[in-house]
Each structure stands twice: as C-alpha cells, then as structure tokens.
Image (cartoon, rainbow, N blue to C red):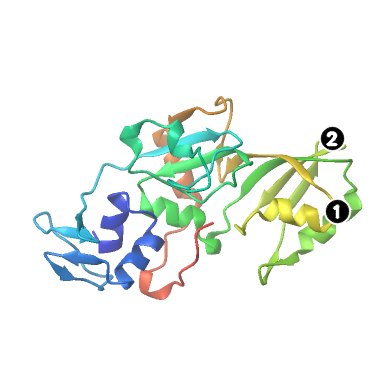
Amino acid sequence: MRLNRFLAAAGLGSRRHCDELIAAGRVTINGKVCTNFSAQPGARDHVKVDDKLVHTAPPLTIMLNKPAGFVSTRKDPHARDTVFDLIPGKFSHLFTIGRLDAQTQGLLLLTNDGELAQQLSHPRFKVDKEYEVTLDRPWDPALAPKLERGIRLDGQRAKIAQIRLLSSTRLRVILRQGINRQIRRMFEAVGYRVERLLRIRIGNLRLGDLPCGHWRALTKSELQSLKWRVPASPHPASRKLHPPL
C-alpha cells in the first residue's frame, strides 16, 4: 500500500491531504523523514506524522443528515457545534468528504477511506451533488441560463449544471463544482437570498428518509455504487493539489 493510501486509511484525511503531509516532510518511517510518494510501509514499519504513531483502521463510511448550525470541521474556535458532536466518539478518526457551510443541511459523508474521498471531492471527476433550494421570493426562470453559463467567483467560472423548478420559491439544482458557498453566492449575484439549502444527493447516493441529526453506515452496495460512479484516481505525482471543498 502506497504511503498516501496508508495515511488515509489511518484517518489522516483524503489522499490529497496526505500527499500534502508527505510533501511537507511531516511524515517519518522508522524515524526518517519520507517524501517519497511511492514508499510502501510494511507491517513492521513505524509510520509517524508530526511524531505521532499512526495505524491503519478498517474502512468505514457513514452518511449524516447534517442540521443547520453545525460546522463541518472537527474544531472551530468560533463555533460551538460541529458535526463530530453528532456521531459516536469511536468515529473520531473519520473525516468529512467535502464540507457543507454551517447553515446548509443534508447529506454529508464521513469516512476514513482516502481513495473514496479523493474520487468524490476532486474537481476532475465532476460528481453530481443535488440540492433543494428555497428562495426568499418567486424565482424568475429567465435567469436560469445565466447561472448555467456561469459567473465569476474566486477567480473561476462557477456554474450550476442543472436547475429545475419545484414551486415558485423552491428549486432543485445540481452542482459539479465545490466553490465555497457556491449556491448561495450565485443566487445572491442575481438578486436572491437562499433561505434554506438542503443537499439530497451525492453521485448515486440519496439522503432518503434519514432523520435530521442522525447517521448510518453505508451499505456495501451503496459503497460499490459510489466507487463505480467515479474512475480511478490519477497517480499522485501527476495531479495538482486542490484546497478542500
């Protein structure tokens, strides 16, 4: 197992994040700094990150129906509630696949499978993420083409892949990007305020009837469906590093 996959399996984050740890010289094998992405630690090797010994754990992925008011980071000095307060302490080694802002609700995945996290969050794979959007006033469908063509956010073109009207103020939208607060900011750019935002789908996985604030482990078939949906990741030496969603 390559070093970045070993670190991801130990719950250190996505493979992308583990590549950053390796490149920064924060990883040692048997007391020696290792910046070789191709290194494959053996069963008797001692792997440490910042002088802390790490161990691999069995792969686990859970879905959480995130309530509003909870942040998606493990610790936030400005926030009292994080999504890790909603899951058992035995899952403290998991990390989120992407993020939802504090007021956004719905489907959030937590895992220790770095390869799965890489494939679902990396921009090159363009995985569908579907949301229900409630606006502050009736939607003008004539504005949809502008959001589908895209507007400039953070120096890049932000697009909504698909917009479908549910009622005068409720929409279904599909994203294939992960720009910070993308949906809220895009609707603000055309004069609307998002009053409620709920993620209901990632790839082939739907939130379903999971109650708000509750979690459950993904089934084997759900995991296979997610992994089938996305092609294999590129070799770490050939891909660019991107900030987390």
Give how far across and how far down residue 171 sits, in percent: 78, 41
Q: Residue furthest left?
A: 44
Residue wearing tag 2:
167
Q: In front here: 53 or 36? A: 53
Residue depicted at x 44% and y 29%: 216
- Mark whose residue sits in front, 2 or 1: 1
Residue depicted at x 35% and y 46%: 112
Q: Earlier in the sequence, mark 2 or mark 1?
A: 2
Identified by mark 2, the residue type is Ser
Judge whether residue 2 can be spotted in this image: no
Q: Quadrant of residue 103?
A: top right
Residue depicted at x 77% and y 59%: 148
Residue depicted at x 37% and y 69%: 236
Residue 9 is labelled as none
Give how far across and how far down residue 73 sits, in percent: 47, 47
Q: Residue furthest front?
A: 78
Give how far across and how far down residue 124 sits, in percent: 54, 64
In the displayed structure, would residue 93 be above or below residue 118? above
- Where does the C terminus fall, quadrant-wise? bottom right
Instruction: Tell me the SS state at disc 1.
Output: loop
Residue wearing tag 1:
191
- Please tell me how crowded label 1 is: few (under 14), some (14-19), or many (20+) other residues with Cα within 10 Å: few
Judge whether residue 32 can be spotted in this image: yes
